[in-house]
């Protein structure tokens, strides 16, 4: 750190991530867990992207958005998990200011994009079930591309631009109580006035979390109403099972994010907060390919056809 005159004016040039310092057994367990989850995340989402690109039968709006989600999950997980594994290998890992700050904003951007993309996917399923005969007319390729670009672009506007427009200043303390440079952990070290930043964060978090989540719940309520009109009991149960698993992952992701970003931030970071922040950043990207593919006969059939071609 560079001295500017007095301890309180010390400019931070690096951060020490002390999330689980002094707990070697916990860190070893986390390393194994994160390595397995990351491997499953990359392989699972990579297979989805490959199958959707290769199989022409999957060239429709639903799988276009699923492919976007898989690419996003690979990027989201890669932005934090490998570095978290490296950080867990030592008792006091150090990251440069620029590297830590970049990781924070990249993670926020990908997480925000996922919020909007999940809402877009819920809208796609709502149109498919409520207007099956007009589905391909309503969800034409121009609309799909616009919705995908909307999710990525609005997330950039809400997550990156506020930080560029109103940068914060770190000085003095440089110990981050987390394994990664997560935004709520870093903001505890800011020594400049954060009132505007906190107001912006609550606004952007509300817009990117509460609004999409409410929209998804509304869409799934309409989907459930449409499912109840299905005469075949087996088809109805299958649709309920699929929607239930989708909704469970959505509630898990939005619930942990809302708890982390919209609740009052205490001065002392609890172990529970570190586990929750790790959950939505590490586990959710792994769950998406499992939930969206293992119950999907089209993807399973495409995988079998690709396997038969290789044999």
Image (cartoon, rainbow, N blue to C red):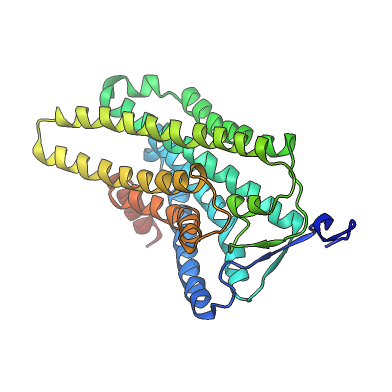
In the rendered image of this protein, does residue 311 appear above or below residue 162? below
Among all residues in the image, which is located at the extreme bottom?
25
Q: Nearer the viewer, residue 237 or 63?
A: 237
x, y percentage for residue 49? 47, 48
Rendered residue at 20%/41% (across/down) = 240
In the rendered image of this protein, does residue 249 appear above or below residue 4? above
Q: Nearer the viewer, residue 152 or 136?
A: 152
Q: Nearer the viewer, residue 16 or 287?
A: 16
Q: How many marks?
A: 0
Q: Nearer the viewer, residue 245 or 29?
A: 29
Along the horizontal axis of the image, is 243 left or right of 207?
left
Rendered residue at 44%/34% (across/down) = 210
Rendered residue at 78%/55% (across/down) = 171
x, y percentage for residue 51? 42, 49
Examine the rendering and report whether any part of residue 240 can be seen. Answer: yes
Rendered residue at 38%/40% (across/down) = 58
Examine the rendering and report whether any part of residue 64 can be seen. Answer: no
x, y percentage for residue 117? 47, 37
x, y percentage for residue 77? 53, 55
Quarter of the image that includes the C terminus: bottom left
Which of the 4 image quadrants contains residue 88?
A: bottom right
Quarter of the image that includes the N terminus: bottom right
């Amino acid at each position: 750190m560079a001295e500017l005159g007095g301890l309180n004016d010390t400019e931070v040039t690096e951060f020490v991530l002390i999330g689980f310092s002094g707990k070697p057994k916990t860190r070893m367990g986390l390393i194994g867990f994160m390595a397995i989850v990351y491997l499953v995340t990359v392989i699972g989402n990579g297979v989805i992207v490959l199958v959707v690109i290769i199989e022409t039968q999957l060239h429709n709006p639903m799988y276009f958005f699923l492919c976007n989600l898989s690419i996003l999950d690979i990027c989201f997980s890669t932005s934090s998990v490998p570095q978290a594994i490296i950080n867990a290998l030592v008792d006091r890992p150090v990251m440069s200011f620029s590297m830590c700050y970049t990781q924070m904003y990249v993670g926020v951007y990908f997480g925000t994009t996922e919020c909007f993309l999940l809402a877009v996917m819920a809208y796609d399923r709502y149109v498919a079930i409520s207007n099956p005969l007009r589905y391909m007319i309503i969800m034409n390729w121009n609309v799909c591309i616009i919705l995908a670009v909307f999710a990525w672009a609005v997330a950039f506007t809400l997550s990156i631009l506020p930080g560029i427009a109103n940068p914060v200043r770190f000085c003095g303390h440089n110990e981050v109580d987390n394994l990664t440079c997560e935004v709520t952990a870093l903001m505890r070290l800011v020594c400049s006035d954060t009132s505007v930043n906190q107001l912006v964060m609550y606004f952007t978090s509300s817009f990117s979390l509460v609004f999409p989540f409410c929209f998804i719940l509304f869409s799934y309520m309409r989907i459930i109403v449409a499912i109840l009109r299905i005469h075949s009991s087996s088809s109805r149960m299958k649709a309920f099972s699929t929607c239930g698993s989708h909704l469970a992952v959505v509630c898990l992701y939005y619930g942990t994010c809302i708890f982390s970003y919209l609740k009052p931030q205490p001065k002392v970071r609890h172990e529970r907060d570190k586990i929750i922040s790790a959950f939505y950043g590490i586990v959710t990207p792994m769950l998406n390919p499992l939930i969206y593919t293992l119950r999907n006969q089209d993807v399973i059939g495409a995988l079998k056809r690709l396997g038969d071609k290789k044999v």
